[in-house]
Amino acid sequence: MADLDLQRLRAAIVNRVDTFETHGIRAALLDWALEDAAYEANDLGDALGAVQRRLETVDCAACAAPSGLIYDADLARRVPEWRTEIDEALTDYHDAVGQRPVIESVGGLVWFAVEWNASEMASILDRTRADILSALAA
């Protein structure tokens, strides 16, 4: 494991991708993925790839997601904080698929929003990778 400046990588990502906010679901996902990247990357380019891979494989039910997303009480506490992002995930899903997701619980609602946002973030990182790497090289 190299001694990486992950805060610099985080800043490069957030500065180039305005939808990666400093709070909410996407911030929690980015921080979690960056923390994981520290253990598997040798340089910031590797770390960016590790962040993208981590986001592509988010699976709340399999505990492959940020902490605090397991117990019903923890999930319910996230709803007010993440309500706007949850609503946006539901709308984006409907727009993309043409139907509403089948959600059976509040926890399922939060998990859906987390997984949807993670997938969107991974796609955005894939499209902006060159720009982020250029910023890191400057």
Image: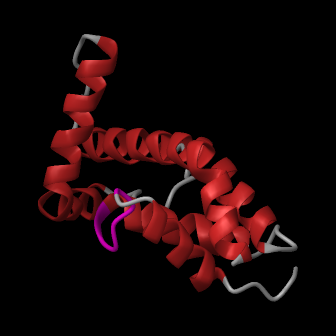
Image x and y of residue 47, in percent: 74, 66
Image x and y of residue 101, in percent: 27, 22
**Span of residues in magenta:** 19-24
Q: Could you tell whether 26 is left or right of 83 in the image?
A: right
Q: Could you tell whether 97 is left or right of 36 in the image?
A: left
Q: Quadrant of residue 22?
A: bottom left
Is residue 101 or residue 42 the one in the foreground?
42
Q: Is residue 20 magenta?
A: yes
73 to 124, vertically: above or below: below
Is residue 91 or residue 67 the one in the foreground?
91
80 to 119, vertically: above or below: below
Image x and y of residue 114, in percent: 38, 48
8 to 41, vertically: above or below: below
71 to 105, vertically: above or below: below
Specify the quadrant that holds the C terminus: bottom right
Residue at x 71% of width, y 68% of height: 37
Q: Could you tell whether 108 is left or right of 6 in the image?
A: left
Residue at x 44% of width, y 70% of height: 15
Q: Residue furthest top?
A: 98
Specify the quadrant that holds the N terminus: bottom right
Q: Is residue 102 visible?
A: no
Q: Is residue 86 visible?
A: yes
Image x and y of residue 58, in percent: 55, 46
